[in-house]
Image: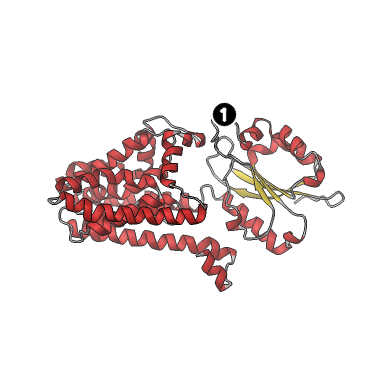
Amino acid sequence: MYKILHLLGNDSVQLLIWIPRLAQALLSAIADLRLYSLMKQLENQQIARWVLCSWFTWYCCTRTLTNTMETVLTVIALFYYPLEGSKSMNSVKYSSLVALAFIIRPTAVIPWIPLLFRHFWQAQRKLDLILHQFLPVGFVTLSWSLIIDRIFFGEWTLVQYNFLKFNVLQNLGTFYGSHPWHWYFSQGFPAVLGTHLPFFIHGCFLAPKRYRILLVTVLWTLLVYSMLSHKEFRFIYPVLPFCMVFCGYSLNHLKMWKKPALSVLFLSNMLLALYTGLVHQRGTLDVMTHIQELGYNNNLNKSAASVFVMMPCHSTPFYSHVHHPLPMRFLQCPPDLTGKSQYLDEADVFYQNPLSWLYKEFHNNSTLPTYLIIFNVLEEEISAFLISRNYERTATFFHTHLPEGRTGSHIYIYERKLKGKLYRR
């Protein structure tokens, strides 16, 4: 998409930001339609219309995360999976989609392990299923992946093995945070389901036996992910549509409390979707929009202007949201691949003593960045440096109502002023 925009001469920053989101939204809409169609086949339109109203789906479906694409491909593959009552079964189509999801993100195979095993167990011609469907699809897809990676890496690379080695065998994902084993059951899963949780539990008891495999898939996925130390809400996004099947079944069987229940679900999910999508943690996007506007309005690339993001690493977007030849830098946090003990990345070293780090890093005034971007929680600690180096706060952006640790409620932009040109805004 970026290349096409470039060739057309329309690679403006707004298109670079919005085209991928719109493309991901389109793919997510196709997946939603497939899930709706599947439930119409298996049950009826009444149940089908209640499986698409999760706040977390609204929150994630336009985000260009590999988890989102994994979810899209999983849902479309489920449409072709041989569930009892389905009229759209196609083993080659669903296995091809599963293989593609695996190539994009290897963890996509986790929820499909019980589903593939069930298909194999129930198949009358097991050898034919493996030799004429699963193996050819797997061979073609993996070969395609290997060739593409060979072209781009310049050497033969099995990235799926590297993924497994990094995240499971070496467990280096813990570098980015770890949670107790029960986190998905006690916090992650309830938060993702939100107010749908009681309806999911209710639906598990009501749903017919043929949906048992979907429940097994959900539990299996939660158990496997619970064994990994590094946990995130988005990791279990692919099984959310499975859960919504049970929620839809529950809602359709409510009699007396149906309207109040639907009202509570609609309002709670709408409010959560709007708040998390439009308000919560929006500052890191707003601040880069401001930097982008500064770059175009003031033509910063013709001066010696530069930007330094002094925040937890990867807090903000980068050049995709600026699209301007402006020197920018952020605190680095590469994981340790050498096995050193007591390893500290640049961000950790900085936060141990921010003031000392800044004086050491910028002992020469000629290397000072024009703009510093910080969370408000850091301001007091580095105020002496800001004053001594003639920095003035020129912009403030709201970020979150729930500041935590190194992440503050607001983001500040500090601009370095030449002596005699200081001003207060």
Mark 1 crowd level (few <14, some 14–19, many ≥20, 10 Å Cα): few
Q: Name the spot of residue 240 as percent of width and height, x first.
A: 33, 47
Q: Nearer the viewer, residue 422 or 188?
A: 188
Q: Amino acid at mark 1?
A: Lys
Q: Nearer the viewer, residue 250 or 288?
A: 288
> Is 383 displayed left or right of 193 in the figure?
right
Q: Is residue 52 visible?
A: no
Q: Is residue 136 visible?
A: yes
Q: Residue furthest top?
A: 341
> Is 281 displayed left or right of 359 in the figure?
left
**Residue at image coords 62%, 52%:** 287
**Residue at image coords 54%, 44%:** 400
Quadrant position of residue 323: bottom right
Q: Name the spot of residue 282 as percent of width and height, x first.
A: 54, 50
Q: Residue furthest right?
A: 420
**Residue at image coords 56%, 26%:** 341
Q: Name the spot of residue 173 as percent of width and height, x first.
A: 47, 37
Q: Residue furthest left?
A: 124
Q: Is residue 145 above or below residue 15?
A: above
Q: Name the spot of residue 239 as percent of width and height, x first.
A: 32, 46
Q: Nearer the viewer, residue 115 or 402?
A: 115
Q: Residue furthest bottom?
A: 8
- Marker count (numbered): 1
**Residue at image coords 87%, 50%:** 420
> Is 312 displayed left or right of 18 in the figure?
right
**Where is mark 1, residue-wise?**
340
Figure colour scheme: secondary structure
Secondary element at tag 1: loop
Q: Is residue 221 above or below residue 76?
A: above
Quadrant position of residue 73: bottom left
